[in-house]
Image (cartoon, grey):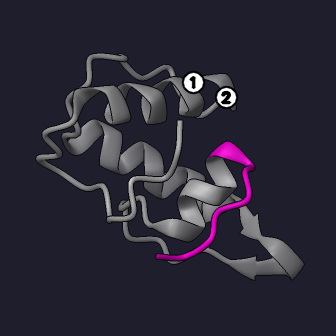
């Protein structure tokens, strides 16, 4: 899945994106989290846990905000993304 070029946060309407994020968090061992496509408090807190434990390239910490922006997306999916 490609980065949607926007921040994904509570209330996200695109359930396919949210399911992909939830699935990836589970796959990386940050769950169990229900893969229901709803970006709510549980998904946000799980993303915060991920952000707290994972460093971006060159030991640069991720912002612990519970939102999936470009840097968090790259970390989760390990893909190269050019900023819009």
User: What residue do we see at 65% from left, 23% from top?
Assistant: 27
User: What residue do we see at 46% from left, 36% from top?
Assistant: 21
* Location of residue 38 in the rendering, given as x and y in whole percent from the top left corner: 20, 29
Answer with left or right where residue 79 lies relative to residue 57. Answer: left
Looking at the image, residue 36 lies above or below residue 81: above
- Residues 45 and 79: in front is 79
Binning the other alpha carbons within 10 Å of mark 1 as few (below 14), some (14 to 19) or many (20 upward) gives some
Binning the other alpha carbons within 10 Å of mark 2 as few (below 14), some (14 to 19) or many (20 upward) gives few
Disc 2 designates what residue? 29
Q: Residue furthest right?
A: 58
The image quadrant that residue 58 belongs to is bottom right
Question: Mainly helix, strand or loop, the magenta region?
Answer: loop
- How many numbered marks are there? 2
Q: What stretch is highlighted in magenta?
A: 77-84
Disc 1 designates what residue? 26
Q: Do the residues labelled 2 and 1 touch (CB within 8 Å)?
A: yes
Looking at the image, residue 49 lies above or below residue 56: above
The image quadrant that residue 54 belongs to is bottom right
The image quadrant that residue 33 belongs to is top left
User: What residue do we see at 46% from left, 29% from top?
Assistant: 20
Q: Does the magenta stretch include residue 83?
A: yes
* Location of residue 24 in the rendering, given as x and y in whole percent from the top left corner: 58, 30
Looking at the image, residue 66 lies above or below residue 60: above
């Amino acid at each position: 899945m490609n980065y949607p070029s926007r921040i994904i946060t509570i209330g996200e309407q695109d359930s396919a994106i949210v399911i992909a994020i939830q699935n990836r968090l589970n796959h990386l061992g940050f769950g169990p989290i229900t893969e229901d496509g709803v970006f709510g408090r549980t998904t946000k807190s799980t993303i915060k846990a991920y952000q707290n434990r994972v460093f971006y390239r060159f030991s640069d910490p991720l912002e612990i905000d519970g939102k999936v922006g470009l840097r968090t997306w790259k970390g989760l999916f390990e893909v190269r993304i050019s900023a819009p």
